[in-house]
Amino acid sequence: MEGCVEGGVVFHRAKLWEIKLEEFESSVMCDDGTEIKASLVVDASGFRSKFLEYDKLKNHGYQIAQGILAEVDEHPFDLDKMVLMDWRDSHMGNEPYLRKSNSENPTCLYAMPFRSKLIFLEETSLASRPMLSYTEIKKRMVARLRHLGIRV
């Protein structure tokens, strides 16, 4: 949060009421009457967003994640950095059945170290059709942790 504030990020707490999309400058209207202008608006509320209109039926992808806050013996990550969307699949080298399914529906790792022995880890499928099973995503996370030498 301190880094965001130092970088000039402005936070506004309100519910989104309306989005007006224009070619060069869009705006969002909030329920408190505030209008925020932006060159890019990202709607991350999911495929049931009331702000999206479809002209035909969509084949939506599904997101699933396995995340843990873990006490570990050690981990290989810098304490002052986060890992976002690590798509590497080298951890599946000894598990060809996982590599095959990962090539069809890939997953990535998020890692947020708090201390040398405390870390948040998440294996995520951003969009798959059909949705990956909880068992599949958990197997991939276990394989990744084993490869990284992380013992929970």
Image (spheres, grey):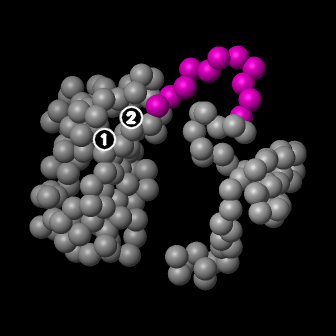
Question: Would you say residue 54 sits in the magenta stretch?
Answer: yes
Kindly check if marks 2 and 1 are in contact, taking CB atoms under 8 A apart as contact.
yes
Distance from disc 2 to disc 1, alpha carbons, whole Å, reads 9 Å
What are the residue bounds of the magenta stretch?
52-62
Please report the residue visible at 31 percent of the width from the left and 73 percent of the height from the top.
Answer: 114
* Picture quadrant of residue 43: top right
Q: Of the numbered discs in the image, which one, if any, rests on residue 135?
A: none
x%, y% of residue 52? Answer: 71, 34
Q: The disc labelled 2 sits on which kind of residue?
A: Pro
Looking at the image, residue 55 lies above or below residue 46: above
Residue 28 lies left or right of residue 106; in this view the side is: right
Question: Would you say residue 38 sits in the magenta stretch?
Answer: no
Q: For mark 2, does the 10 Å Cα neighbourhood hold few (<14), some (14 to 19), or many (20 or more) residues? A: many
Please report the residue visible at 67 percent of the width from the left and 48 percent of the height from the top.
Answer: 42
Lower position in the chain sequence, tag 2 or tag 1: 1
Instruction: Label 1: state its secondary structure.
Output: loop
Outermost residue to the top: 56
Q: Can residue 148 be seen in this view?
A: yes
Residue 134 lies left or right of residue 62; in this view the side is: left
* Picture quadrant of residue 77: bottom left
Residue 149 lies left or right of residue 30; in this view the side is: left
The residue that mark 2 highlights is 106
Looking at the image, residue 13 lies above or below residue 87: below
Q: Quadrant of the C terminus?
A: bottom left
Q: The disc labelled 1 sits on which kind of residue?
A: Asp
The residue that mark 1 highlights is 89
User: Predominant secondary structure in magenta?
Assistant: loop
Instruction: Label 2: state its secondary structure.
Output: loop
The residue closer to the viewer here, 53 or 71, is 53
